[in-house]
Structures are given as C-alpha cells and as structure tokens.
Image (cartoon, rainbow, N blue to C red):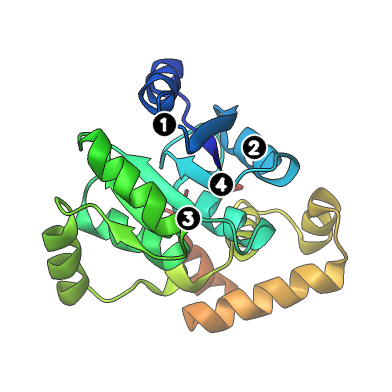
Amino acid sequence: MIRLLIADDHAIVRSGLVQLLSDRPDLVVAAEAASAAATLERAVDSNVDLVLLDMKMPGPSGVTLVKALRELRPTLPILVLSMHIDGQVVSRALRAGANGYVAKGSSIDVLLEAIARVVDGGRFIDPSLVEGVVFDHASMPMPLHDTLSARERQVLGLIVAGVRLGDIADRLHVSAKTVSTHKTRLMQKLRIDNNADLVRYAISNGLTGDGAGL
C-alpha cells in the first residue's frame, strides 16, 4: 500500500485527487496539506511514502519547498503535480530534488505511472513536458542561486531585508556562528565577495523575503 500526502492549497483539487485515487487498492491518501508549513509538518509526522506536491502554495513554496522537504526527508519521493509547465520551472524543481513532474492537465494514467515510477526509486517527467525541459535546459545554464540550500536562501532573504546576523540567529534559533557559516557558503556559491553585490544579485533575481526566491 502506497500512502500519499497530497499538498495543494485548493480544496477542490485535493478532493478531486482523493476521488480519482479512491478506487486504487494499492493507493491511499494518508494526509493532506494546504500550505508549505503544513506540508513540512505532515511529511515529518505522517507515515507517508510519497508527496504529491503543488508548486505554488502559501508560504515558502516551489523550489524552496522541494529543497526543504529533501532536507527533512532525504529519501521521501517527491512528485510535483502542477499547472506550471514551463521547461525552466520543471528543470529547477527536478534539480532541487523532485523525483518527478506531472502537468495537472494530464490524464490519470500518466499520474498513476508517475507515482509507481518514483515510489519504485525512479524518476519521471510527464511526456508532454519532455521537449520543453530538454530545449530549455540546453539553452540556459543553471542559475547560481539554484545551488543554495533552503536555509541559505532564508538567510540571504533576511540579509537583504537588513536584518543583522545576530538577529537572524535569534529568529532561526541557531548560533551566530552558524548564520555566519551560511552567509560565507552562500556568497561562495554565488561567487560574490561583498554585501553590496550580494544585495544587488538578490534583488535582480527576486531572492528577497524570508523564503528568498520562492
């Protein structure tokens, strides 16, 4: 029996998925979540085998949420089910740690195949999205900020917001030394060596706010 966590902020979508999957004897919806925070909580507290994840929900969503899930549950399969079908969005989600990506407009057969594939340890890209992923990936190099962890993005967003390192440490409930380490690593990854350039990079790439580029 495959236990699913459905993470989507639209109740109608969640209900529809529950109905579509209810006649499958090998699948059960064990938990639901309507926000990023609830998704992370359910992923840790619930005994689930797969997260069926929307890319846009309240809170740190998208790539940031995928990375956070991957850090919390390194082996938990993540299958994105989203209306966002741009090749770059798909590629970023997969690079962040998603095991598969399915368009919401696809058939239930495609979704079922994706679930079976990723739970079995494989990867899956919706056939309707493959061409866009291939050509977008070939034409555009991976942005440097895609290498940042969820915590590094969070620290970056707070730095750009003008929060002092000591206050960031208090807010994140970690030591000031840990925050300094995160800052050093993220600056190395972004190939930046001063605060002014760091702020300019963050603003130009939309990496602002607590989630830093959700």
Q: Which residue is mark 2?
A: 37
Query: In the drawing, what numbered circle is on residue 119?
Result: 3
Q: Quadrant of residue 106?
A: top left
Relative to the observer, which residue lies in front, 185 or 125? 125
User: CA gap, disc 1 to disc 2?
Assistant: 28 Å
Residue 128 in the image: above or below residue 59:
below
Rendered residue at 61%/47% (across/down): 210
Instruction: Please tell me whether mark 2 or mark 4 is closer to you in this view.
Output: 2
Q: Which is more N-terminal, label 1 or label 3?
A: 1
At label 1, counting other C-alpha atoms closer than 10 Å, the crowd grade (few under 14, some 14-19, many 20 or more) is few
User: CA gap, disc 4 to disc 1?
Assistant: 41 Å
Rendered residue at 72%/46% (across/down): 44
Q: Is residue 100 visible?
A: yes
Query: In the drawing, what numbered circle is on residue 209?
Result: 4
Instruction: Please tell me whether mark 3 or mark 1 is closer to you in this view.
Output: 1
Q: Quadrant of residue 10?
A: top left
Q: How many marks?
A: 4
Residue 212 image position (x, y, % from top left): 53, 53
Q: Which is more N-terminal, label 3 or label 2?
A: 2
Q: Quadrant of the N terminus?
A: top right
Left or right position of 45 against 189: right
**Which amino acid type is shown beneath numbered disc 1?**
Arg
User: CA gap, disc 3 to disc 4?
Assistant: 34 Å
Q: Secondary structure at mark 4?
A: loop
